Image (cartoon, rainbow, N blue to C red):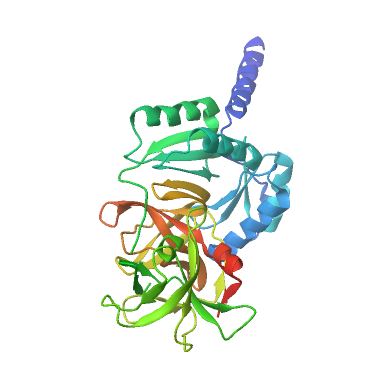
Amino acid sequence: MSNRRTSRRAALLAVAATLLTGTAFALPAPASALPAPAPTGVAAAALAADLRQRLGEDRTAGSYLDASGRPVVTITRAADAQQVRAAGAVPRLVTRSAVQLAAATAELDRSAAVPGTAWVVDPATDQVVVSADSTVKGAVLDQVSRTAERLGAAVRVERVPGVFSARLAGGDAIYGGGYRCSIGFNVRSVSNGDLYYFLTAGHCGNVASTWYGDDSMAKPIGSTTGSTFPGHDYALVQYTDGSVPPSAVDLHDGTTQPVATAADPSVGQSVTRSGSTTYGRGGLVTGLNATVHYAQGTVRGLIKTTVCAEAGDSGGPLYSGTTALGLTSGGNGDCTLGGTTFFQPVTGALAAYGVGLY
């Protein structure tokens, strides 16, 4: 009898230790409580975003799509599991909330904001992931490492090859200011439907007032009317010609993909990018609201992905099916070895300029 009590006590202590270390784990559901098949893709991302908003930042660390495309919503209170399941998502209990992870990010902003670093919340591991490129070394790397160590398990540091850079020069090619960039999405004014524009990257908009459709710069196609970089990375260019086709992505095979709506993606979502250098490339969203310290300046609120890109792809569209998601900003690596690419959310650009897809 004594041995059984000892074994039971040891088992309980082991469970308690697991909880205290902050290990994230899925909450099992009784068979009678299993939800109907969960949505996937864009619908899953929308459901996850709605649940995050309903729970609030003190009761969730975020959400992501699992390998099968199901929405997983993190929770900090086991009592919220039923609400998440009832909505059609999978609950996952974690230790740290979005509020706590935001505090860790704020400390990184204060103490480790050096060129060549980037950070983003990873809801799957309930951590802030700090990426340091090849230029971060010596005393600067020590500074980043000390800050991460001070924040404990809330932060993990990873080294990435290459250099984080805003990639100048990206869909269909446009030329201006000695650079090549790409058209992101065609848009028009919400208040005046006769004014047509396209979106591209802000670091592109900063370098040219007039854009051309050919490298000899003989065919002007538009003029920059607004550009923001750093801080954000979007620009608005008004078309010279009023006859502009509806929003679509050039697939670089003689066909296009119509784009009808704009939305924010979810971590784990499959996405595709188009650019004038490397054309169509696919991958996964690995983080949202990322901060990137380019040598050219700091940009916040970006989408982090595994999609590759190269110089010339800047400003090009990120999309999923008929949904517009982002504009190519920058990253590291290339499409031979792979790398990380960051995107400006298109919803922020649309709101900033008072334009919409059509």
Note whether 326 is above or below 286 in the view shown.
below
Q: Is residue 297 left or right of residue 110?
A: left
> Where is residue 292 drawn, in percent x and y?
46, 47
Task: Out of 55 and 202, give the one closest to the viewer.
Answer: 202
Q: Quadrant of residue 24?
A: top right
Q: Is residue 268 left or right of residue 138?
A: right
> Where is residue 175 drawn, in percent x and y?
33, 72
- In this view of the protein, can residue 38 be seen by the observer? no
Note whether 292 is above or below 200 in the view shown.
above
Q: Which quadrant: the C terminus? A: bottom right
Q: Is residue 97 left or right of residue 118?
A: right
Point out the residue furthest to the top here.
2
Task: Out of 186 and 205, give the one closest to the viewer.
Answer: 205
Note whether 201 is above or below 154 in the view shown.
below
Q: Which quadrant: the N terminus? A: top right
Residue at the (48%, 38%) spot, across then down: 113
Residue at the (66%, 15%) spot, across then down: 5
> Where is residue 155 drawn, in percent x and y?
51, 34
- In this view of the protein, can residue 196 be seen by the observer? yes
> Where is residue 298 drawn, in percent x and y?
47, 48
Task: Out of 215 and 122, give the one closest to the viewer.
Answer: 215
Residue at the (34%, 59%) spot, across then down: 309
